[in-house]
Structure formats: C-alpha cells, structure tokens
Image (cartoon, grey):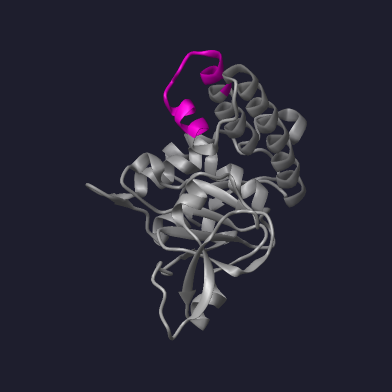
Amino acid sequence: MTAIPDQIREAYGETPVGWELKKLKFFVVVRNSNVDKKISDDEELVWLCNYTDVYYNDRITSDTRFMEGSATEIEIGRFQLKRGQVIITKDSEGWEDIGIPSLVTEDMPDVLCGYHLSVLDPGPNMDGGYLAWLCRAEPLNDQFKVSANGVTRYGLGQYPMKNAFIMVPPLETQRKIANFLDEKSERIERLITQISGGALGAKALRDLAESKDKSLCGLLMEYRAALITAAVTGKIASLL
C-alpha cells in the first residue's frame, strides 16, 4: 500500500467516510499530446485544440475556433476530444500556468488535443466535471505546479501527474459537487460582471484570484477558490 505523504494529508484534511485518497492514475488515463501545428501532406487534416484554447476557456465546446492541422491515424485515435475529458496545460513559461484545466463538453472526433497539453481521460469511477474542479483546487493544482521542472520554461511530466494524490468520493457525490460548483461559480462570475461592468474571461478571473486583490471582486474570487477546495475535500456537509 502506498504511503501518503504528511503534507498531502494535511492539504486534503480528514478523508470523509466513503471517500478515497489515492493516486490519479487509479481513476484517470493520462496522455501527453505530441500533435504539433505543422501540416504534413501524408497526414489527415484535423482541427487542433491548442494551448490558448485551454488557457483562456474553462470549457472546450464545438463553438471554439480551432486551428487547422494534420495528424497520423495513430494520433487521431489517441487524441480525439471526447465528452468528459479534461485537458490541462503541461508546459509554460511560468509555473503558475501549469495544470490549468478545461472540460470537454461534447464528442469532437475531428478535433485533437494539441502540443503542450495533456488529456486526462476519466475512468468509470471518475466524473469529468468533478475532475475539472479537482484540478482547480489547491491540493491537486499545487502538486502539479511543484512537480513541474524547468528554469526559463516549465514542463509537467506524465509520472508526477499520474502519481499526484486526489480525493475521490462516490460517483454520484462527484456529480453533485460538480453541479454545485458550476452553479456557485456562475453566480460569482455574474456578480463580478455586474461590479466590474463587463464579463471577464477565465484568464482574467485567474489573474484576479492570484493577485490577492482585496477589492470586492478579488474577495469574491478568493471565496470561490476556498469554496472549490472545501467542496472537493468533503468539507461542505450538504454535499456529503
């Protein structure tokens, strides 16, 4: 049985009854994409979901404007976008941009996950919506950031991703938590839109949360971050 480091136990807190604290690899298939932006004559034309598509959007939908690219038959089989997958950033110039997730909302067989990204493919005991929120929560996201190597550019390998520890409740509870956080996050973002006078994208909201801004908008994003971590670690009694 794998020993769980003390700092991991401390980050997640007490494990609720019926929940598990185990490595990501037991619930999710991790694949680092090697599909580049070059178009080759001997490859099939496809659309590419690139780094910026994930970086600037919490969800990948068919309305996203994808870049044209090409890929081999093997790459198409491995990296087609499917509903419920979570795509995360694995390479970046700054470690704070490692592990940013975006949820794939529908099957898109003509769209592939591009370079500098990883596909997290949930198994039968993992809900994709819950996984996306889990990736945004500090206990998991901090593991990704700390595991990224580099000096002028950071990269997160498959091994630390697969061996990161996650808190996993029963499947029905996962879906309940995902729906709860979808609703609460949407309400918070509407409030910020009203206060700021305009809608902010995913990147702007992240910047606001990381800035430690003590304005009302900054405090709302601080509350959102705390709410995410509380929900995915079983600290909200109504979700248990």
Would you say residue 129 sits in the magenta stretch?
Answer: no
- 185 vs 212, left or right, is right
Residue 178: x, y in percent?
Answer: 70, 42
What secondary structure predominates along the stretch shown in magenta?
helix
Q: Which residue is drawn at the image coordinates 62% and 24% (left, top)?
A: 193
Q: Which residue is drawn at the image coordinates 42% and 83% (left, top)?
A: 41
Q: Is residue 141 above or below residue 219?
A: below
Q: In the displayed image of the protein, which residue is found farthest to the top? A: 215
Answer with the quarter of the image where residue 109 lies: bottom right
Residue 136: x, y in percent?
Answer: 53, 40
Q: Which is more toward the observer, 8 or 47?
A: 47
Residue 33: x, y in percent?
Answer: 45, 66
Would you say residue 213 sits in the magenta stretch?
Answer: yes
Residue 84: x, y in percent?
Answer: 66, 57
Q: Which residues are magenta?
A: 204-220
Q: Which is more toward the observer, 106 or 197?
A: 197
Q: Is residue 180 above or below residue 89?
A: above
> Which quadrant holds the C terminus?
top right
Q: Which residue is drawn at the image coordinates 31% and 46% (left, top)?
A: 93
Q: In the displayed image of the protein, which residue is found farthest to the bottom? A: 42
Q: Is residue 219 above or below residue 44?
A: above
- 172 vs 57, left or right, is right
Can residue 163 be seen? no
- 113 vs 233, left or right, is left
